[in-house]
Image: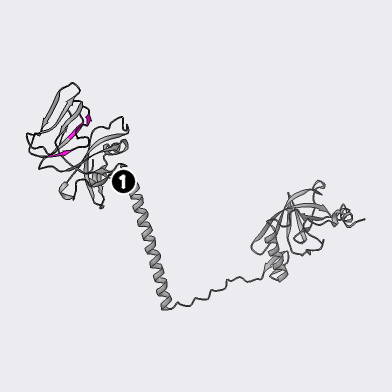
């Protein structure tokens, strides 16, 4: 018969728990304890990390069954309860009160406190006083030795490091605050704004072709002529002693429609302004009371008023509106014609306090 076959015919009382090689690999220690299985309470005789020997009475149906046992160790002033799943095995004659409780999972959650109690008993820290246990190990925590005071150079280095950390933290907080403020407070239009100068715009009175164009015309001289589709020749004279600015599309041979802007009349009291197209979202913020501002290329911020004049050309973009931009106080800003800027809307958090609408 092989060694493997010999292992299979071991008697139940000689079998050991899984994961261990020898039956007596872990010796039994006589530590006072009690075990409760169901409603029955039994006295402990000895215990190891693999099984516990107890004395008590159990119903015959419990023999050979798997139950949850509560191991109780009563100390002076407190007790420790360990829960473990065990296999109940009858030991000895049928009228004997000896029972063996084999741990189904010897390395379960109960192992660590059980090993501590057993090791303390072996080290002499646990002593038996009647049916109770007493702990004789150390009860006071060792005092920490005060650390030596660092030298002057080390204290200066620590101070410099602390100041550097504080400065870096403050810089990051300031940067994050600026980003949050910019995202929450401002909304920028995607289209750039080119500053121009105010004046009256002369538009084409009929559809046709420009047959004559004079961008240097003076008061009373013919500025342009239109060969209308009706066959008429329409000529327009300069109506004032002012400067003329030719608009895109003003040249001889250009085909125009009625209402096409051709020239702008710039008077002596003209101011800087701009005409641009804004989105529906920008118009909604404008109507909600947000303050419109121009951000110039040099970082200068100029408060402006925005007037919605007419919708943009449907053939170009149905999501844009034409707007006239005028500085609130032109004298307070250094505005230059043909300067490029960005239009943004600043949200008014407390309009009553800031004077907004």
Question: Residue 330, how many percent across, how many down?
Answer: 16, 46
Q: Is residue 351 visible?
A: no
Q: Is residue 327 left or right of residue 161?
A: left
Q: Residues within 10 Å of mark 1 (few under 14, many from 20)?
A: some
| Residue stretch rendered in magenta on the structure | 243-262
In the depicted structure, whether residue 104 falls above or below residue 311: below
Tell me if residue 236 is in the magenta stretch. no
Instruction: Please tell me whether mark 1 sits on a helix, a strand or a loop.
Output: strand
- Which residue: 32% across, 33% down? 319
Q: Quadrant of residue 175?
A: bottom left
- Residue carrying label 1: 186
- Residue at the extreme top: 230
Depth order, front residue of 192/284: 192
Question: Residue 331, how many percent across, how many down?
Answer: 15, 49
Quadrant housing the C terminus: top left
Depth order, front residue of 255/44: 255
Tell me if residue 250 is in the magenta stretch. yes
Q: Is residue 170 left or right of residue 354?
A: right
Quadrant housing the N terminus: bottom right
Question: Residue 19, how many percent across, how many down?
Answer: 77, 57
In the depicted structure, whether residue 144 falls above or below residue 55: below
Question: Residue 289, how many percent across, how many down?
Answer: 26, 39
Depth order, front residue of 240/108: 240
Depth order, front residue of 263/96: 263
């Amino acid at each position: 018969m092989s060694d493997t076959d010999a292992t299979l015919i071991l008697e139940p009382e000689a079998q050991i728990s899984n994961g261990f090689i020898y039956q007596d690999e872990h010796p039994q220690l006589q530590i006072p304890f009690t075990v409760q299985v169901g409603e029955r309470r039994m006295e402990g005789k000895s215990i190891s990390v693999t099984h516990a020997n107890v004395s008590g009475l159990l119903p015959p149906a419990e023999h050979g069954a798997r139950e949850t046992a509560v191991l109780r160790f009563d100390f002076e002033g407190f007790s420790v309860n360990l829960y473990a799943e065990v296999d109940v095995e009858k030991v000895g004659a049928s009228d004997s009160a000896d029972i063996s409780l084999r741990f189904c999972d010897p390395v379960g959650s109960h192992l660590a406190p059980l090993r501590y109690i057993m090791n303390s008993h072996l080290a002499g820290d646990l002593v038996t006083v009647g049916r109770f246990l007493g702990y004789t190990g150390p009860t006071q925590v060792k005092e920490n030795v005060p650390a030596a005071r660092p030298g002057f150079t080390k204290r200066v280095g620590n101070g410099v490091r602390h100041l550097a950390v504080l400065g870096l933290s403050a810089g990051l907080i300031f940067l994050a605050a600026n980003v949050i403020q910019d995202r929450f407070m401002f909304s920028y239009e995607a289209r750039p704004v080119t500053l121009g100068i105010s004046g009256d715009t002369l538009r084409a009175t009929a559809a046709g072709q420009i047959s004559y164009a004079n961008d240097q015309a003076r008061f009373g001289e013919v500025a342009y002529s239109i060969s209308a589709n009706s066959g008429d020749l329409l000529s327009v004279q300069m109506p004032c002693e002012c400067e003329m600015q030719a608009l895109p599309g003003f040249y001889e041979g250009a085909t125009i429609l009625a209402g096409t802007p051709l020239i702008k009349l710039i008077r002596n009291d003209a101011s800087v302004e701009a005409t641009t197209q804004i989105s529906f979202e920008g118009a909604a913020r404008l109507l909600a009371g947000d303050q419109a501002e121009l951000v110039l290329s040099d970082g200068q911020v100029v408060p402006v008023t925005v007037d919605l004049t007419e919708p943009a050309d449907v053939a170009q973009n149905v999501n844009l509106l034409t707007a006239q931009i005028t500085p609130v106080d032109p004298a307070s800003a250094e505005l230059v014609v043909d300067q490029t800027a960005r239009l943004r809307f600043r949200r008014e958090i407390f309009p009553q306090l800031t004077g907004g609408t």
